[in-house]
Image (cartoon, rainbow, N blue to C red):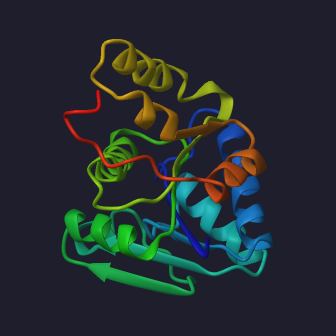
Amino acid sequence: MKSIAVFCGSSIGASEVYREGAILLGKELAKRNITLIYGGASVGVMGTVADTVLREGGKVIGVIPTLLEDREISHKHLTELIIVNSMHERKSKMMELADGFIALPGGPGTLEEFFEVFTWNQIGLIQKPCGILNINHYYDLLIALFDHMQDEQFLQTQYRNALLVDSDVILLLEKCLAYVPPAIKTYQNN
């Protein structure tokens, strides 16, 4: 695995623990020589993980749409900043560049980006690991929703099992590295 896209907030969150988790992930990505692909902002959890990878000697590629370049305060010191025309292009470029995906705490935009790559895995457009770094139990309710989807048979067990979750950065990265994609979703194999 040469690159991981990280979806996360442009805010820092209510607790210092979110910043600390972003720092731990950034250090581990740099240590493993895994390029960070992310949304290109210099603020919030996004900026923290990018700054950490850079400070630790790693490579960071930001992808930001023109609409958000000023609003999210694009990072000016990245290895590479790719400016695109739309949010759709941003997600498409990040999916193209990344070998895997991790969600850190964030808001609706973080979830929207993560859900798209998770869905694309289900239908076979990509076959890359999708992980959630569950810092401070931030994603407990979302994980419970995935379990509910499985229980109510709106999410096949193989795809629920493909959702990689951990509160430990190293364990989550190990799960991503060991990922074996499930069979592509069909309506015959519920």
Residue 49 falls in image quadrant: bottom right
Residue 4's place in the image compared with 76, above or below, is: above
Toward the viewer: 56 or 33?
33
**Picture coordinates of residue 50 (x, y %)?**
61, 68
Toward the viewer: 172 or 127?
127
Where does the C terminus fall, quadrant-wise?
top left
**Picture coordinates of residue 152 (x, y %)?**
31, 12
Where does the N terminus fall, quadrant-wise?
bottom right
Q: Residue at x 72, y 77 (%)?
A: 33
Q: Residue at x 31, y 64 (%)?
A: 91
Apparent side of residue 139 relative to residue 182 in the rendered image (left or right): right
Q: Residue at x 59, y 53 (%)?
A: 179
Residue 151's place in the image compared with 71, above or below, is: above
Residue 148's place in the image compared with 12, above or below, is: above
Toward the viewer: 49 or 117?
117
Apparent side of residue 3 relative to residue 113 in the rendered image (left or right): right
**Picture coordinates of residue 120 (x, y %)?**
29, 53
